[in-house]
Amino acid sequence: MSIKKSLRILLIISSIIPVVLVSVIAHGLLTHRLISVQTDNLQKIAETNQSGLVALIETQRTEVSLLSIHDEIQSLVRISNQTDNYSPDAVNKLLTIRKNSYKDCEIMTLYNFDREIIASSNPSIIGFDGASNISLSYMFATKNFAVGVSGIKPYVFNSTKKHTIEIGYPILEQNSDSETILGYLISTLGLSYFEDFLSSISIGETGYGILLDKDGTVIYHPVQELIGNNIHADRLSSIVDDYNKGLIPSSGKFEYFHDSSNRVYGYCVIPELDWVLLVKQDISELRSLTSIILSLLIFICAVLLIFIIIFAHSLTKRFTAPIIALRDAMKTASDGNLTVQSNIKSKNELGELSKNFNKMLHIIKTNYEDLASMHEELLSNEEQLRTNYDHIEYLAYHDTLTNLPNKLAFLDYVNAALISSPRASKSHAVYFVDLDNFKTVNDTLGHEYGDSLLIKTAQILTSIMGENGMLARAGGDEFLIFKENISSKEEAVAFASEMIDCFRNPLNLGDEVVYVSMSIGIAVYPENGLSPNALIKNADIAMYKSKDTGKNKFTIFDSKMEEELNRNTLIVEVLRNAIDNKEVYIQYQPLIELETTTVIGYEALMRIRSERLGSITPEEFIPIAEESGLIIELSSWLLKEVCNFNKELIDMGIPPRPVSVNISSIQINRPGFISLLREVLEETGLPPQYLELEITESSLVSSIMDATELLNTLQELGVKVSLDDFGTGYSSLNYLTKMPINTLKIDKSFIDNICYSEKDSQIAKSIIQLAHSLNIKVVAEGVEYENQLALLKEQKCDIIQGFIYSGPLHAPALIDMIRKA
């Protein structure tokens, strides 16, 4: 047997045995791990969805509780408790509207203290006695809300039977210190209310969720016929009882044989309702996944075997090929051909043998080959130098990707055209073109697609250029166009419009289709510049104006654009040195408690007064500070100054009050913000409870979970949190129910029209009632008139801020106001 064949067989055997062993061990470990991980996953799914169920019930309970304090319902209950002469029509209508707002709400029923139905979304049942209703008895005994206390109840409407639960709330006397029950309000809710939420629990082909009450009655099951029936499995129906007895934790997992199938279950108990959410999956399905893994491992072994055979063949060829090559070279040389070479590159004994063999032949024909080689090298160098010179000259004036002229060539061309045409005789136009959202193509599809897009764009622009002018690539996704001898600005605008129209249809980039738009700036010679650089600069300014005003458009340069750009640049310079130049200062606007008309706090407002620009409004300098990043330094300075000032007031013997500070979303999302806040409080010595941070809704909308973690950290630190401009952004109950908020500020836009717009008045009233139900203080911003103040007093707003009491004050004026009060 040859060396080549023996080596190949040895490599195959020594490689395949470890692969098979590893595959068998990996299959066993993966099977065990998969079942363990999936069982843990079922428990986590049950725990996660338990929170969602509690939120669904809490939403309904909140709705019923808010409805129970409605003035018309309160009034009807009082009258019905005193006399039989009352009209329930208005309340019937109110209850019908509430019922219709939730498709799963079957009926809304109002009872008086004697448990007689006095109003309902179904007026035909008015007058019925509810003395036997368990929910009413529970609320009478506990004076607390009742959710599903009477269990699952059938409800028949239009010959259709539905399973329901009752959510009740006692109607308490609102203007009394004692909790006197006037009546009861019950919402009968169909169990289909949970269907949309629980039907989303799906794991594989056999995994789904089941909701049971404490007696094992099915509240939800994917099989509708089982809802309302008792589940025939002692282990499953006794989970709530076992939890209440302390035998099992509130959530867990177990394996159980049920319905002729061995299954794994994850469960989570809802203690407030005595319900349990089960998530199950058949073990047979999990084991079927391991069979797929086994098949995959067999396939991998087969593929590896093929690769091992190929590798063994390649490796043996690599080691035997040099020996065969050296043998053939020696045979050729022995036949008299001295030009033969042994090309063995191995760094071993065979390589050394090959080198010595070549040196031997080289000595024989060295003189002739040296002369021939020198001649060929001279010819090759001459040709290479000529080629390199032409290539360098081309690169100096062209873009290598699109083969368009570059900016240097564009400047030479425009300069020559301007020199050859007198200023008053001809007009020209320079276009600065920038692709919109080009970075998105690079980030999502890759740079190769970005390059293809630039090449395609260059081809389209070249096709519409015409003869008089030049198209060049300025760099990145920017292009420059020079149109010579235009007749008017209208012609320049028409060409820009033509460019935009050419890109309205999508572009094919190989196997991808992308939509492209462009922002164009136009500078016309001689009105907008007399030199190439001036025209390009002004076209660039106009292009950025197109981007700032919506993109996918063109803009002709106007001198006001340059003035605006110059002013923004000056504002950045002012902001950069405002602290050192003492051009930034603070004013304080008092917060007045309506009940006592006393100053209970004040908001710190940053102001800028520059020697060069005069007073700059916050509406102008705050966005520029955020865009430039200078808001970080300014906000840090503001925090430190405000905390120092408030500590000085306390040291002066003035009763302590919290000071509010607006915090930019850029500052609060910056790493290390909490550490900065701690340092400021420690350095100034201000107790944390006398600092309140005002945060806008837009700062919280990106991630409620992240925002909740941040606000909890602030609360643990002792700092208060105020939600600013509420109602103008993404207003949601989530902010108020899930986030630790101390104060809610109603935006001035609602307060301005609160006396003239019924809609704004109702919104303000609803916000105040909702906040109070959650123990959140309410501040009304921008109160300027007596009628606004009177209406806010009527709606029980807590705190007022506005010119009706005081505008922003300098520190000494604020101190005088507090001392006089």
Image: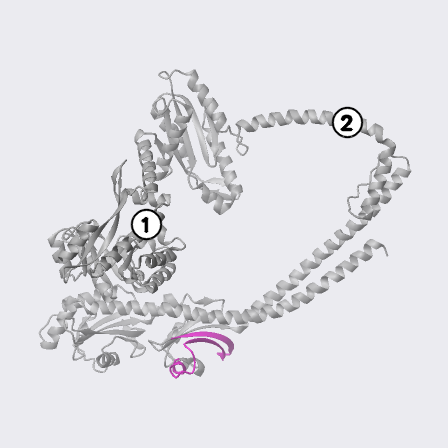
* Residue 637: numbered disc: 1
* Residue 339: numbered disc: none
- Residue found at the far right of this picture: 335
The residue positioned 79% from the left and 50% from the top of the image is 319
Find the magenta span and give its range: 240-269
Under mark 1, the amino acid is Trp
The residue positioned 72% from the left and 57% from the top of the image is 308
Relative to 185, 452 lies left or right: right
Question: Which residue, given by chain and number where applicable, does mark 2 sit on?
Answer: 374
Picture coordinates of residue 482, whole percent (x, y): 43, 25
**Where 450 falls versus 176 (above or below)?**
above
Looking at the rendered structure, the secondary structure element under dot 2 is helix
Picture coordinates of residue 342, whole percent (x, y): 82, 40
Q: Does the magenta stretch include residue 83?
A: no
Residue 759 shows up from this direction? no
Relative to 156, 219 lies left or right: right
> Toward the viewer: 519 or 807?
807
Nearer to us: label 2 or label 1: 1
**Where 42 falls versus 780 (above or below)?**
below
Under mark 2, the amino acid is Met
| Disc 2 from disc 1: Cα separation | 75 Å
Picture coordinates of residue 151, whole percent (x, y): 31, 79
Which quadrant is home to the C terminus?
bottom left
Q: Is residue 247 magenta?
A: yes
Residue 536 shows up from this direction? yes
Is there a contact, CB below 8 Å, between mark 2 and mark 1?
no
> Toward the viewer: 282 or 328?
328
Which quadrant is home to the N terminus?
bottom right
> Toward the viewer: 27 or 85?
27
Label 1: how many Cα within 10 Å (few below 14, some 14–19, many 20+): some
> Toward the viewer: 155 or 77?
77
